[in-house]
Amino acid sequence: MHQQRSGAVRGLGSRLRIDPWGPLLAAAGVVIFLLHGFGGVLTRDLALYSYSAQQFAEGVPPYVSVLNRAGPLAHMVPGAGVAFARLVGTDDLLTMRVLMLVLSAIAVWLIYLLGRDAFASRLAGAATAASLLSFQGFVTYAGGGPREKTTMLLLVVCALLATTHRRWALAGAATALATLTWQPSFFVGTAAVVVAVLGLTWRQAPAALVRFAVGGLIPTAVITSYFWGAGALRQFLDGFYFINAGWTDQTGLAEFVTGRPEEMVEGFGQSLWLVIAGLVAMLVLGVVQLLRRERSDPRWWAVLSLSGATVAILLWSVRVFNGWADAVVMLPLAALGLGGLLHRLVRSRPRWLATTVVATYTLVLLVSSGVSSWVTRPAELGPMRAEIDAALAAAGPDVTVLSIGAPQPLVFGQLRNPIRHQMFIDGLNEYLDDDLPRGLQGLAERIAVERPTFVTMDEPTWYDWARPVIREHYVYVGQTYDMVWYVDNRIGPERIARLERVIGGAA
């Protein structure tokens, strides 16, 4: 592994050569991911994407199966995992998590190439990939999903890599696909391209922007056509854009960090400080580039575009930031900041010293990440699955479940929710009151008509509109993994008592 000091940014059309450090670092990532394992608990959000993926594999379009506000690829990509699982006879959830692991490993490979080519140094690329693998949140979702952030991160890296190589149409397509997975990633890819285009001549810039726009329009048109053909165009537009624009309540980064700082620590652990340092480093590298004024050098613009993307996503996050997972979009930029900063510190040193420093940095991060993955290896999924399966079995044959913020039983039981509405927070209550013929009152009446065997909730105090129906027709039988279970009171006292033993005992 030697430091590359000169030459323009490599073109993607150059002769194909596989740099061995990319697959080696990806393989190291696989080891780290496997050390962490696939046993993470299936939380509400993860279950929502899992359920929608199962429905997509069965032919139900996203937003029709469940009302959600992320992009459609957040449901479609894990849905491909479910389709494969059912083709070969493996478990739905495990296969989705293996797919997320594969996507994460590819992201490690590509971010190595991005760091290498943006800073013209294999050392910078290795340090960048190792930095990404040191971020706890990235490792958590690699084997503990499915979550839309994993797919989005890979596509953001693709967009930044294409921008670095001035492949504008590819950058547009990757930015659009990332946006169709998680909407705020639009600002990362677009800001990077806008800054990079400033380095072109006045004749080249318009053509580059047109290619970027056309590249983005193609996947957008394909997805839109799919929903139009499925008769679900309105559901797509509502879930992807209009609900977010008109009803969703959003918190900002400052409000979130001051109000719930423990959640950031829970998501990233000690690596949170590395994330912050990397983002600051990426901003500093941008300032340094401006001071150098080497505008004829494509690498000068490549680094500046990465810094511009960092500014853009930070500005967006000041306005909208709802949880530690929203910081995942920043992780590639933080990793690039750490890799680029280390490159600048050692690039004027003798080659042997620079290689030793970066190799030590890389090895320390990889080993520490592996140890952390093993020490924090979760094992809740097995007991959680067993308890939910026992509850469903105790209710007898033909069990049905209606989820209100607790779709985990739907995933494990491969059941279909009687209604498409499972989320009622952050403005969705107001949207449903406006959109449904009788609002939330009508939805409660539908529960009384459907009378599913179980109603599961994540937090009953949030759902005042459902309380009268639950009190009249259902009996509380226990709680498992932050899910509250109510069973239809027509099921009979014997089964109710059995369920209280099964679910109450689990609690």
Image (cartoon, rainbow, N blue to C red):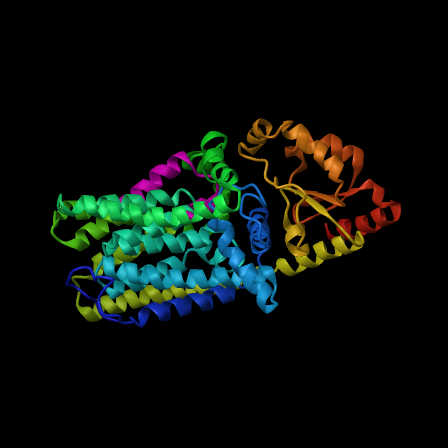
Could you tell me residue 183's position as x and y percent?
A: 42, 43
**In the shown orientation, is residue 274 left or right of residue 47?**
left
Instruction: Name the residue located 38 percent from the left edge and 54 percent from the top edge.
Output: 155
Query: Can I make out residue 473 in this image?
Result: yes
- Give the magenta-colored segment's residue range: 307-328
In the image, is residue 325 part of the stretch drawn in magenta? yes
Could you tell me residue 435's position as x and y percent?
A: 57, 29
**In the shown orientation, is residue 428 left or right of residue 172?**
right
**In the shown orientation, is residue 351 left or right of residue 274?**
left
Residue 502 higher or lower than 35, as above or below: above
Could you tell me residue 351's position as x and y percent?
A: 19, 69
Instruction: Name the residue located 30 percent from the left edge and 44 percent from the top edge.
Output: 190
Could you tell me residue 374's position as x and y percent?
A: 51, 64
Residue 295 higher or lower than 91, as above or below: above
Quarter of the image for residue 367 reads bottom left
**Image quarter hosting the N terminus:** bottom left
In the image, is residue 367 part of the stretch drawn in magenta? no
Quarter of the image for residue 108 reads bottom left
Query: Can I make out residue 376 in this image?
Result: no
Quarter of the image for residue 123 reads bottom left
Please tell me how many numbered marks the rendered image carries: 0
The residue closer to the viewer here, 136 or 310, is 310
Q: Which SS type dominates the magenta stretch?
A: helix
Instruction: Name the residue located 35 percent from the left edge and 41 percent from the top edge.
Output: 314
The residue closer to the viewer here, 57 or 401, is 57
